[in-house]
């Protein structure tokens, strides 16, 4: 483990000897006043001083990194988050020796154990091994419950109580089921539970796979028997939560890291006045950027010309170029605010949401199928989440609300008891699909075991961590985070926050429809809810009722069966919502050593990462509404996440939006603001933007305006040698980047230029057609093609266009697309039939709009595709090529009349292939 | 270093070469490669290229390479209760089942191979067998993800992607990582078997079809006269070069122009590599081409050799669906799988040897897991049609060629063939060993992904399989 913020525990006033005395006193008392053993003497004289000098800085009684305290013999025997550190049966195999020998511990190279010092440890563990064993810890219900949860409660738990038996608590075991009490405290051999295990009646071997349970191990049965024999003792252990005292696992210094402290705008605002003499610094952003550039001997670059700026802002905000008319209007608009008005207009265009939703869907890992299995089970209702995101962005839903709904939408409204499901209720439920986007094989029994479920949960937390929180939380699943002060405990506190909905012992499987894979016998219910708006439901009901009527009519006719079948096929799919919701009564959460559910340790309760809070204040958890069985945990967590002073939430989102406009994040690692992430290049700017976002009621559109109206954004993308030398990677924003269109913008731009765009919004996705060679294209439609965001996003079959232009695998999500340049892209653009078809449409459009004069056509095609006029030279080159092509075609095709049209198609095809089309200045 | 061509493409290559120097691979600063130019490995490699014969489905170790006399002796005895947690389909579980195939010692080395693979049996002196592989999941999809990418689940770069990320390619006219899938259909997990995950898509496998146009979009969907295409290409090139001249220093534009030129050359090279009419009749026969059932797989084996000859770094061969997934009809279905592949694979080894390519090529054979020693019965419980269920705790793989200690048997399973017990080899060990033979250190081949140092072998402990390494 790498420990960067080491500190010495200064407040410790007791001398080492005193501590040792206490520790030894404990040992001595344990051993019934027997004489001091050789191992104890050796500990005091040799081992303790060694540990003190090398290990106790991090692993002491107050601050135990990795849950490990090396300050006393008893705490050493207890071990840490990785389990026992001393193996008394195979002394030489002890974890502590392994860590010391490999040089992994202590992390500071200068502090590492010499061979001689290692021998001291070895000898001591050898000596302890020879001591007679002390009393083991008494067995409690917390040793037994995890076993019952993983082996029995699938059929004797919350969802199903076969034989009316529930094995989730001691009292329920005593109550027992149809055959009587499950346990007789003090007498395991008379306990039905043990008898049935011994005779292999339970868990029934032939039903294990159906229940996604592995057979019970002999050691597990023994442990249960021992517990029963001991009287089935129950001790009250409070789950570990922040409890008002200092956190022993995260130190004060750990919280001082820049991104764990709330953003502050004050100091930066003060700096502005001093920067006021800079050129045209129309906004604070320019000042922040100019300040750093000045240090390099640079200034903000010259502005791009109006027409370049127009294409840039159109592509950035809507993912499409302007119409030729819009170009003329803008060029003729002499109003000083003409550009600002364009920005406003684009932000209120519905195309804005369709463009920017894609960025969020990448983060969420949106897919229309479950993935991970060959069948790639479809998610028939996922598209509602896509529509939710588009609408949320278009309506400028405040970002805090946007987050709140996606994490805890099911705890915002009492939808189960509502008379009418309103739009806001529906939206909030649809939003929770954010937490249902992880690839998921658990619909099938054989890939639905507890470890498979834990993987799904881990992916969901990874999505949450990398998209909204900005930390690599996933690392702490198996061990405390190597770089950030995130103890393993904090991961499991988070697990407990989600337990009401994500419970590995009470798992809701994805819906399995007939014909796809084995249908499970113990499906608890599927992951969709029927709570669409009452209006939509009524519409569906009446449509469905009409079908019923038609069927009733049909039945009156002879040979009705075929007719009925045909009518039934027209019945609309029941509208349902893919969602995540709290079910109440969550299973307890234990920390899993090394992430292994067979190796549970402490019981933990819900909480937030300690480093991001004071580490003392527990999460304020309330039932979402009186009488609710929902835990309210996720709502409390989401509210914490969108607190105005949250150190990460606002910073992470402003950094992402900045990245999408300027090419590089202020923090380059968009999903990792931790210690292994990149440091911000402009920390004051990042903070200022974060504070501005919160101050502006979390309005994303206001943030866009702020960024797009800056001189930094209006710079040209030209690189001079000087700028390149001083700012090679453009991390100081000395120019605007030259951007390749992403897959969607490229496709959508071709649609809009060719006039083939079908502007229909929302609803189920358009399908793909796959050719025998694997080419997947959007199924053709006479009404044109919809934007790519409305095309099916299954994991196994991805549109070839998307695949060629860096569409990511959503496994689980994508933080940043690549923009690669590879030969298959050239092959695709030059040879693919769809691209050719769109070129043909553009050529048709040119004929239609400006007639048959090639000069005018060239002018039109340039405006439609490249949003500008051709230069004189370009027009000349184009005309020459068109003449050549026309001549060539005249001799090649029988209908000479068609030659100009064919030539224009080839020209349009070349334009769609050109760098000028694919790159944005 | 690779010869640099002229013209715009040459200029682009020069740019890429310069950026490559800056991004010398996998050094400790974690900068990463972004092109396919050849790169220096970490240390002197044994192999320059890999041919991976992926045997999707889980070939049965105790019926091919790991004889178990115990099964003959205890045939018919019950075992299910002891291994219930390791059986995928408990309802179909039968008793201990002996192999329907006969084993014999083969070659100089005396390696046991069953009579299901008579041709491979003649090449055992070129091969190192690992009998003690194990994995961590007994279902196809997860286990295939593990064997391809080291982790249970999609989204990670596959072995081939890591290799070409690490080494680039010897050929700039062909993709660095070529996948030869079966015209009859894709394997389990489909195209995810050769994805580059979080590595740039440049490093993902490119499918070559063995009939028709070898690469997707290699030929135009719309037929147009060649002179028209030439005029359009000329127009495009002129416009792009003007565009480029107006944007000095943006070298990304050179790379784009180069990508069009590479596309054009790939059209030629790919067709040439797949043109088997250049091969002699005796070569075709050696691979079983023109004969059934070997023709299809034989073609892919021969194309693999031709690709390796032309500098392709990583070639991966697939068979449709899961011919090795013999839940039923072990005696017939597994034999059929052998019959499709045995001669072509033996032919490939012999051909690589006779051309001296075996000294620089690593051939790897194996599936995603093994099979159980007990029978799996069909619904009518007819034992004659019995097969075997999946087994994650023991399976066989083999390697041949560059750097491999030929004629070796490594590792042991228990008497049932149920568990690997001695010299156990994890999938990570196996991955690391393949990288090692290519001169790559598994620990130093990494990429920073969202601030984390990601490797093929992940965070688990890794031991090279030294016992199969030659010197």
Image: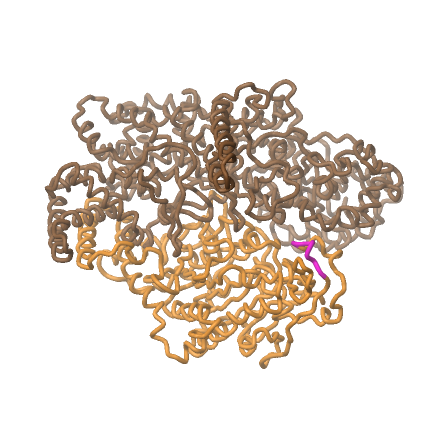
Residue A749 is situated, as x and y percent measured from the top left of the image, at: 29, 39
Q: Relative to residue A892, is residue B78 drawn left or right? A: right
In the image, which residues are magenta? B88-94
Vertical side of A818 occupied by B352: above or below: below
Residue A305 can be seen, yes or no? no
Chain drawn in orange: B
Of all residues, the one furthest to the front in this rendering is A558
Residue, x 61% and y 19% (percent of image)? Answer: A625
Q: Nearer the viewer, residue A742 or A120?
A: A742
Q: Nearer the viewer, residue A612 or A92?
A: A612
- Label tally: 0
Q: Nearer the viewer, residue A566 or B397?
A: A566
Residue A534 can be seen, yes or no? yes
Q: Relative to residue B370, is residue B217 drawn left or right? A: left
Vertical side of A893 occupied by A484: above or below: above
Residue B87 is situated, as x and y percent measured from the top left of the image, at: 67, 55
Which quadrant would the C terminus of chain A be assigned to in this image?
top left
Q: Is residue B90 magenta?
A: yes
Chain drawn in brown: A
Name the image colouring.
by chain
Residue B461 is situated, as x and y percent measured from the top left of the image, at: 60, 55
Q: Is residue B74 magenta?
A: no
Which quadrant would the N terminus of chain A be assigned to in this image?
top right
Q: Nearer the viewer, residue A300 or B339?
A: B339
Q: Relative to residue A885, is residue B447 drawn left or right? A: right
Residue B347 is situated, as x and y percent measured from the top left of the image, at: 47, 75
């Amino acid at each position: 483990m790498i420990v960067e913020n080491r500190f010495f525990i200064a407040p410790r006033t007791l001398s080492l000897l005193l501590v040792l005395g206490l520790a030894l006193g404990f040992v001595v008392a344990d051993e019934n006043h027997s004489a001091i053993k050789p191992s104890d003497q050796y500990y005091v004289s040799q081992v303790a001083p060694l540990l003190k000098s090398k290990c106790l800085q991090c692993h002491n009684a107050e601050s135990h990194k990795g849950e490990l305290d090396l300050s006393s013999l008893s705490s050493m025997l207890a071990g840490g988050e990785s389990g026992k550190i001393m193996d008394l049966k195979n002394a030489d195999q002890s974890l502590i020796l392994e860590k010391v020998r490999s040089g992994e511990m202590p992390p500071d190279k200068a502090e590492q154990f010499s061979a001689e010092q290692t021998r001291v440890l070895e000898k001591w563990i050898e000596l302890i091994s020879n001591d007679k064993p002390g009393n083991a810890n008494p067995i409690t219900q917390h040793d037994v419950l995890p076993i019952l949860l993983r082996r029995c409660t699938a059929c004797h738990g919350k969802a199903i109580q076969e034989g009316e038996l529930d094995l989730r608590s001691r009292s329920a075991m005593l109550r027992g089921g149809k055959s009587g009490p499950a346990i007789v405290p003090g007498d395991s051999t008379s306990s039905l539970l043990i008898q049935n295990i011994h005779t292999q009646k339970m868990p029934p071997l032939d039903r294990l796979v159906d229940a996604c349970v592995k057979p019970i191990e002999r050691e597990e049965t023994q442990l249960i028997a021992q517990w029963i024999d001991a009287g089935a003792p129950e001790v009250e252990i409070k789950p570990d939560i922040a409890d008002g005292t200092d956190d022993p696992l995260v130190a004060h210094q750990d919280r001082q890291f820049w991104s764990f402290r709330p953003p502050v705008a004050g100091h930066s605002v003060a700096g502005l006045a001093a920067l006021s003499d800079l050129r045209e610094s129309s906004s604070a952003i320019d000042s922040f950027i100019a300040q750093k550039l000045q240090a390099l001997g640079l200034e903000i670059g010259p502005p791009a010309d109006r027409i370049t700026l127009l294409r840039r802002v159109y592509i950035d905000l809507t993912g499409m170029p302007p119409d030729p008319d819009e170009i003329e209007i803008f060029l003729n608009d002499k109003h000083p605010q003409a550009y600002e008005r364009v920005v406003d207009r684009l932000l209120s265009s519905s195309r804005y949401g369709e463009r920017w939703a894609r960025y969020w869907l990448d983060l969420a890992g949106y897919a229309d199928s479950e993935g991970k299995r060959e069948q790639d089970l479809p998610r028939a209702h996922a598209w509602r989440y896509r529509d939710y995101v588009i609408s949320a962005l278009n309506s400028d839903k405040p970002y805090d609300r946007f987050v709140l709904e996606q994490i805890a939408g099911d705890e915002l409204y009492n939808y189960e008891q509502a008379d009418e499901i309103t739009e806001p209720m529906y939206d909030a439920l649809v939003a929770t699909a954010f937490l249902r986007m992880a690839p998921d094989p658990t619909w099938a029994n054989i890939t639905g075991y507890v470890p498979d479920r834990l993987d799904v949960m881990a992916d969901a937390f990874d999505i949450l961590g990398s998209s909204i929180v900005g930390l690599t939380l996933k690392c702490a699943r198996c061990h405390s985070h190597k770089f950030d002060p995130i103890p393993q405990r904090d991961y499991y506190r988070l697990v407990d926050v989600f337990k009401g909905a994500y419970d590995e012992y009470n798992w809701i499987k994805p819906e399995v429809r007939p014909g796809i894979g084995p249908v499970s016998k113990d499906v608890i219910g599927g992951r969709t809810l029927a709570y669409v708006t009452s209006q939509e439901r009524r519409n569906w009901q009446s449509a469905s009722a009409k079908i019923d009527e038609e069927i009733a009519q049909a039945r009156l006719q002879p040979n009705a069966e075929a007719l009925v079948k045909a009518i039934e096929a027209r019945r609309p799919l029941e509208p349902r919502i893919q969602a995540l919701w709290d079910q109440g009564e969550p299973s307890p959460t234990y920390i899993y050593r090394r992430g292994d559910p067979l190796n549970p340790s402490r019981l933990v309760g819900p909480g937030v990462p300690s480093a991001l809070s004071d580490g003392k204040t527990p999460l304020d958890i309330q039932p979402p509404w009186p009488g609710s069985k929902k835990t309210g945990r996720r709502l409390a967590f989401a509210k914490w996440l969108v607190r105005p002073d949250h150190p990460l939430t606002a910073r992470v989102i402003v950094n992402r939006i900045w990245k999408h406009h300027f090419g590089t994040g202020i923090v380059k690692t968009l999903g990792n603001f931790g210690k292994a992430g990149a440091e911000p290049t402009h920390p004051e700017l990042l903070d200022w933007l974060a504070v501005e976002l919160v101050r502006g009621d979390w309005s994303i559109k206001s943030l866009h305006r702020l960024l797009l109206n800056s001189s930094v954004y209006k710079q040209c993308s030209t690189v001079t040698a000087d700028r390149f030398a001083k700012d090679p990677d453009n991390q100081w924003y000395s120019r605007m980047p030259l951007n390749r269109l992403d897959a969607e913008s490229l496709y959508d731009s071709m649609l809009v230029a060719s006039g083939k765009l079908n502007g229909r919004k929302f609803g189920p996705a358009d399908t793909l057609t796959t050719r025998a060679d694997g080419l997947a294209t959007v199924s053709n439609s006479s009404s044109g093609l919809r934007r790519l965001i409305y095309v099916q996003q299954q994991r196994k079959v991805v549109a070839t266009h998307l695949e060629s232009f860096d569409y990511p695998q959503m496994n689980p999500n994508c933080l940043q697309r690549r923009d690669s340049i590879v030969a298959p892209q050239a092959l695709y653009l030059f040879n693919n039939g769809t691209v050719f078809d769109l070129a043909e449409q553009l050529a048709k459009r040119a004929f239609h709009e400006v007639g048959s004069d090639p000069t005018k056509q060239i002018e039109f095609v340039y405006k439609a595709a490249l949003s500008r006029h051709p230069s004189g030279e370009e027009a000349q080159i184009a005309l020459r090529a068109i003449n050549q092509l026309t001549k060539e075609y005249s001799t090649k095709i029988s209908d000479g009349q068609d030659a100009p049209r064919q030539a224009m198609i080839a020209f349009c095809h070349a334009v769609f292939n050109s760098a000028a089309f694919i790159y944005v200045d | 270093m690779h010869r640099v061509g002229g013209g715009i493409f040459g200029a682009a290559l020069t740019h890429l070469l310069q950026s490559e120097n800056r991004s010398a691979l996998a050094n400790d600063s974690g900068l990463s490669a972004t092109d396919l130019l050849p790169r220096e490995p970490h240390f002197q490699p044994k192999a320059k290229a890999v041919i991976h014969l992926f045997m999707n489905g889980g070939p049965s170790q105790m019926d091919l390479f790991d004889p178990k006399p115990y099964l003959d002796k205890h045939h018919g005895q019950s075992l299910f209760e002891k291994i219930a947690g390791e059986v995928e389909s408990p309802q179909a579980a039968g008793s201990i089942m002996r192999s329907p195939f006969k084993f014999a010692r083969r070659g100089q080395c005396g390696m046991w191979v069953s009579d299901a693979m008579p041709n491979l049996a003649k090449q055992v002196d070129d091969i190192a067998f690992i009998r003690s592989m194990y994995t961590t999941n007994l279902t196809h999809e997860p286990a295939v993800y593990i064997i391809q990418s080291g982790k249970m689940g999609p989204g990670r770069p596959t072995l081939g992607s890591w290799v070409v990320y690490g080494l680039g390619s010897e050929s700039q006219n062909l993709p660095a990582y070529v996948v030869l899938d079966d015209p009859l259909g894709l394997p389990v997990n489909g195209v995810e078997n050769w994805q580059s995950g979080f590595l740039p898509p440049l490093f993902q496998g490119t499918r070559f079809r063995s009939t028709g146009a070898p690469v997707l979009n290699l030929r135009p969907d719309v037929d147009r006269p060649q002179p028209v295409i030439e005029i359009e290409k000329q127009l495009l090139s002129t416009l792009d070069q003007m565009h480029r001249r107006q944007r000095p220093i943006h070298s990304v534009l050179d790379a784009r122009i180069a990508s069009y030129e590479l596309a054009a050359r790939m059209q030629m090279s790919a067709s040439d590599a797949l043109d088997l009419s250049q091969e002699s009749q005796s070569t075709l026969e050696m691979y079983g081409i023109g004969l059934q059932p070997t023709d299809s797989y034989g073609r892919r084996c021969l194309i693999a050799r031709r690709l390796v000859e032309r500098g392709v770094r990583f070639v991966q061969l697939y068979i449709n669906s899961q011919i090795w997934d013999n839940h039923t009809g072990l005696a017939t279905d597994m034999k059929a799988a052998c019959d499709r592949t045995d001669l072509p694979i033996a032919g490939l080894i012999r051909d690589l040897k006779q051309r001296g390519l075996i000294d620089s090529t690593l051939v790897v054979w194996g599936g995603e897991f093994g099979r159980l020693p007990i029978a799996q019965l069909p619904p009518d419980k007819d034992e004659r049609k019995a097969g075997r269920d999946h087994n994650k705790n023991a399976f066989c793989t083999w390697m041949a060629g560059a750097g491999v200690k030929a004629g070796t048997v490594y590792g042991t399973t228990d008497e049932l063939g149920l568990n690997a017990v001695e010299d156990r080899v994890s999938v990570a060990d196996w991955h690391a060993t393949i990288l090692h033979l290519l001169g790559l250190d598994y620990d130093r081949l990494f990429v920073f992904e969202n601030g984390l140092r990601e490797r093929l072998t992940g965070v688990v402990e890794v031991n090279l399989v030294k016992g199969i390494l030659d010197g």
